[in-house]
Image: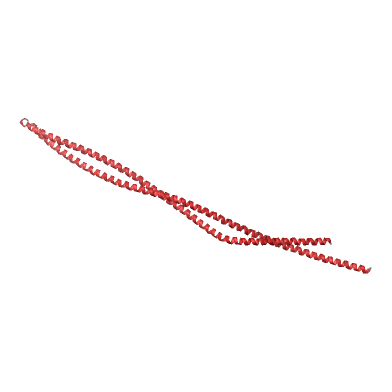
Amino acid sequence: MLENNCVNSSMINETGFMIKKRDKTMEKSIQFGVKHIEEKIELLMQEEVEVSNYLDDVAKTYSQITNISEMTTNINDDFKSFSSYANQINTVIDNSDTMINQTGTNVTELANNILHTNDQLDNIAEVFLQLEKDFANIKNMSNGINGIAMQSNLLAFNASIEAERAGEAGRAFAVVAQQMRVLSTSTKELVDGIDDSVKALYKSIKDVNIEIQVSKSASMANLHKVNAVKSNITQVSECTDEVKNFSKQIIKGIDATSERINGAAEGFGAISEVVDSFGEKIDTLNQKMSKKSTIICSVIDFLQQMENMLAELVTD
């Protein structure tokens, strides 16, 4: 009986020792499991951070592609503007050509008008020469009238003397009368000549006035032509300024387009590297996601093992 009690006590002690040993082992396993889970969770968080970084890189890649697309659109817009400016320059140049042609026509007409004015001035000079001749004729006729007047006075004086000698000497009056008739005829002819000369003089003066008026009209026409030439030259100058302004705008557009083309070239050069690295990043991202899945599965398996161990502990 005593022996049986000793055996039972020994078995109880051994069983208690085994239970304590199992409990310690379980405790260590749980501690190890908790530590293992903490490590896995920390690793999982690191993987989450790396995955987030890779997603940011992917977003940046798409952003670069979008920027390149926008640069291409801007380049197209710049070239459209350049085409518009080029068309405007063509229009301005056409207008300049038209103005220049009109200027040439007006200058030609002006030269012809000046030549015609010179001819009119020559005609005026001839008219004045004729006027001088007419005045010379009038002067000569006036001298002739003066001579006739002197002769008339002398004959009248002689006639008065003869009148005192009446009688037979009266016959002399017939001679005097005859001379007076001749003198009268000569005077009439001179007066007619003077009248004709005066008429010619007035006609010459009238012609001079007409020529002067024509010259004035020609001068006014020349003035209008000169003003038209000045206006055309001003318009040509304005067209030239417009061409210069459009040229400046084109130069600016070309510079801006050149800069954007250079930027696009650099972007297209960089996009090749980005695309190459994009594939690598996707592969790495897949690996990270696979690793993440593996960690999660490992945690789940460990938790399942812990659940089984706890179930066994409860059963015992």
- Asked if 209 appears above or below 262 in the picture, the reply is above
Residue 24 lies, in percent from the top left, at 81, 65
- Residue found 58% across the figure and 57% down from its top: 65
Image quadrant occupied by the C terminus: bottom right
Left or right of 46 on screen, residue 83: left
The residue at the far top in this view is 167
Horizontal side of residue 44 vs 153, given as left or right: right
Q: How far across and down, in percent of the image, does residue 115 sit?
A: 30, 47
The quarter of the displayed image where residue 189 is located: top left
- Give residue 305's position: percent from left, percent from top: 77, 62
Residue 299 in the image, given as x and y percentages of width and height: 74, 61
Say which quadrant the N terminus sits in: bottom right
Left/right placement of residue 291 relative to residue 66 reads right
**Rendered view: 87 above or below 178:** below
- Residue beneath the point at 74% across and 64% down: 36
Question: Looking at this view, is 308 or 220 the one in front?
Answer: 308
Q: How many callouts does the rendering have?
A: 0
* Image height of 99 relative to 200, above or below: below
